[in-house]
Amino acid sequence: MAEYLIKNGFVFDPVLGINGDKTDIAIKDGKIVESTALSSATVIDAAGKTVMAGGVDVHAHVAGPKVNAGRNFRPEDKLFTYESGKGVRRMAGGFSVPTTFKTGYSYARMGYTTVMEAAMPPLYARHTHEEMRDTPIIDEGAYPVFGNNWFVLEYLKNNEVENTAAYISWLLRTTKGYAVKIVNPGGTEAWGWGLNCNSVHDPVPYFDITPAQIMKGLMEANEYLKLPHSIHIHTNNLGNPGNYETTLDTFKLFEGEKPKDEFGRQQVMHHTHVQFHSYGGDNWGNMESKADTIMDYVNAHDNLTIDIGQVTLDETTTMTADGPFEHHLTELNHLKWTNRDVELETCAGIVPYVYSPNIKVCGIQWAIGLELALLAKDHMRVHLTTDHPNAGPFTRYPRVMKWLMSQKAREAQLDAMKWGDKVRGQSLISGIDRELSLYEIAMMTRAGTAKCLGLAHMYGSLKPGLEGDVAVYDYNPETADDPEQIERAFGNAAYLFKAGEMVVKDGEILSNGRKRTLWVDVKVKENPQVMRDVTEKFLKYYTVTQANYEVHEEGYIRNPYRIEVDATQ
Amino acid sequence: MSKIITDVVCPFCGTLCDDLEVKVSDDGSKIEEVYNACVIGTEKFLHSQATDRLTVPMKKDDAGEWHETSMNDAVEYTAQMLANAKKPLMYGWSSTSCEAQSIGHEIAELCGAVVDNTATVCHGTTLIAVQDVGVPSCTLGEVKNRADRIIFWGCNPAHAHPRHMSRYSIFPRGFFTGKGHKARKMIVVDPRKTDTAGMADIHMQIEQGRDYELLSALRVAVRGAPLPETVAGIPREIIQDAADTLKSGRFVVIFFGMGVTQSLSKNHNIDMAIMLTKDLNEHTKAAIMPMRGHYNVTGSGEVMGWQFGYPFSIDLSRGFARYNPGDSSSNDLLRRGEVDAVFVLGSDPGAHFPFSSVKKIWDLPSVCVEPHYTPTTAVSKLHVPVAFVGVEVGGCAYRMDAVPIHCRKVAEPPEGVLTDEEFLKLVLARVKEIKGVA
Ligand code: SF4
């Protein structure tokens, strides 16, 4: 395989502690190596350029039934966005819900190499994998949803953590899933009857359990299994004024808990798109930022991680397993609404949304996301996301970097808002002059996310032995002065190497790569009771047979990468 | 000795029953019995065993006479036809696997084709309505476990989806529906007294083509506003009674079929039905679901969706995907004479398209890939017999609620007969050679 020596670039690697030093990076046989290991390398001149490990996205909705429902019910999302095929590249289009091909190419062009699909309904796991199979270049994994699953509700009602763990192990293997996702615990099941759970103590109808018990129990099961990633939570009461208290209530459930995995993660829970969960006030008129209160808590507790869910001020397509929230949203904006309840497991809702800079609330939401990142003390634990496509498309990451790295750019955006002064008054953004460095951006987008996922042994750094995933950007940190350069450069990688292969050069896709699908195979002690329960539920309540539920690697999963965990000890 | 294969998926209708048992001979060559399937499903399996099965490609000469030809020649003809056409139509896809569809799409992209599926003549109107107003829906297990109010509108599952009512919608006992059909109320809207209507608690025998009015009236009644004496031939009291029945339910499901999608007002009917569902969600829980016909028409829409962004009628001829039903849909293109070759796989437009369209297929270079001899064969220039997907080869298919299920292979295809996927792969390779792409 080809060897590459990337010379003279400004390297940013928080894992190795390299902060903009000119260092050469060597790639051989798909991995990062010491440059002495090279024999006949192609030299890439990265002088005046920024070099980082490939980006790792911890949370995006890029494949599966709700993503595709979003594509199919929004032909308007394809307007002006189509690119013809060329060379190895298939034709591709879509803005907030791009086609699978476009998803792969766009991530690659931003220098990203690994992306996690943040919510996979188990019954639709096959669909999710089919889409990931058709997404070129990037490595992907998917999180099955557990927070409203009938098995989990019933086991945890009786505090049966071991049974919950055995069920998780079975479901991860059956669906080829990566981690335990929780969305509006209990509330989505309540939505089966048009109801919701608005606080962590609201009982789930008919199941005699509360969201707090579900989240706590799943955390215990997750640590019992020693999974690479922690539980991944989207808590109750998303998107409502005053909801920061629900968020704090959720955080507090995990106080004093320690991770038990052997993958080097620090957290017992990841809370996703915290921007949507940091609202003060009690109505849309007095809704205000509580990012400071939230970040005070996050900064003081190192057993949790968050991602920001940055609003990008675009027209987009919201989609979540939080069914009642999407119904609430369609009542609010009166745009089209798709909903799909999934037997025994979950639900999904989809509604288009316009985050207009002319709407005050959107401006405050925009400010909150940035504040979370700017008030963070440890960017290894605070990640950059837009909850794609919920708060905005992932293709806006370079723009979010610009806002994080430049106060001038933030002020310009505030000035461009119709209610800029009111946004300033009901948020903290104007009073924050912090500008993040590329080192911190590398933490938020690579080193921290890889660690949080339990994948620091593969991604997130340029340490010899790791995957040969390297991004080179045409950005000179010593001379750059215009914030727009940030957005331009990070949206168009000069080079991207994926598993040692050059897949992007000057923004053009050279190869579809050898994308891999990551999944976690965790071994537990035999548990006949859980297996009996599974058989019974399939006979009585599911509409597919148990034998037709499993997604087999063959045919459905491109280059499966199985991560084995032994939880029998 | 025979053996029994369990958990077999029925590749016939959108109900996609996956609990079939098939008895095959020891060497796997012969299907002896099919258990659990309905009559039509059973027939699909047994038909693959027909002794007069087509196994060799047939080509029509200039005089209109059919001659056997080789598979190589069939691939060559198809590849040349598609590669040399300016705007070929590649139609069908609803009775084949997602894997085959995917390869078909790659060919279509290379040849600048129009790809379209059978939704264009059945639930395409539904897909358009969904683009207008969305669709609150659910999986069939939600119906089984929760639903106590069922509407069948313009569909007749007793005949078209024979196991639907027993597996999912009326008879089964689920988690919250322990009393089965006894605790369910069934409403049928149909101008005919169908066998399904005969079972209903309320049969609204609507005047033909008046679906839009009746749906509007139900929305009015759900809101408690006054109604005229009769709407669409249905007395006010019955409409009010139906609305009250729905509102008093805990979980309402509306199933609808081609009786509404293809009657007057088309997609506007479905807009209204979906909005009725949305209204009901302010009072109770409600969902709506199209009764999709072919076993994998839903899958075709899904694969097109993730690869191109639209569910049917996709024109790739300009180098990007363009979607404009009424313009980029099969019948419009055929009747306007805008396509110069026709490739059909996994459906039978010869039987279902208007005669004016079928005549166009007759005039054009055309290929029909299909296990049976069909009306489409009769008007095509080349017929390529293939294996039965879901019987002789596995593959993914999507049920009417878009749940993907992997179809199982239960028997060997006759010797020399390719699967859809294998045939398409050969065509793709040849098209690439002709086009000079890597
Ligand atoms: S109802 Fe449909 S899927 Fe089920 S056995 Fe009959 S034809 Fe097959």
Image (cartoon, rainbow, N blue to C red):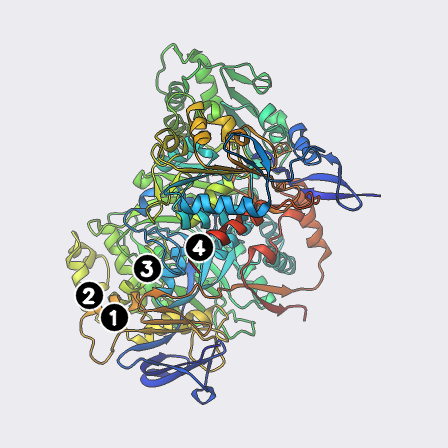
How far apart are the alpha carbons under marks 4 and 1? 29 Å
Residue picked out by circle 4: A235
- Ranked by sequence position, the earlier of labels 3 and 4 is 4
Which disc is residue A395 wearing? 3
Which disc is residue A409 wearing? 2
Question: Closer to the camera, A525 or B374?
Answer: B374
Q: Does residue A357 appear to the left or right of A24 in the view shown?
A: left
Determine whether A429 is above or below B77 in the image. below
Say which amino acid is labelled 1.
Answer: Met
Label 2: which secondary element? helix
Labelled pair 1, 3 in contact (Cβ < 8 Å): no
- Ranked by sequence position, the earlier of labels 3 and 2 is 3
Judged by depth in the image, the label closer to the viewer, 3 or 2, is 3
How far apart are the alpha carbons under marks 1 and 2? 8 Å
Res B155 visible:
yes
Residue lying furthest front: B63
Label 3: which secondary element? helix
Q: Is disc 3 surrounded by few (<14), some (14 to 19) or many (20+) residues within 10 Å? A: many
Q: Are marks 1 and 2 on the same chain?
A: yes
Residue picked out by circle 1: A405
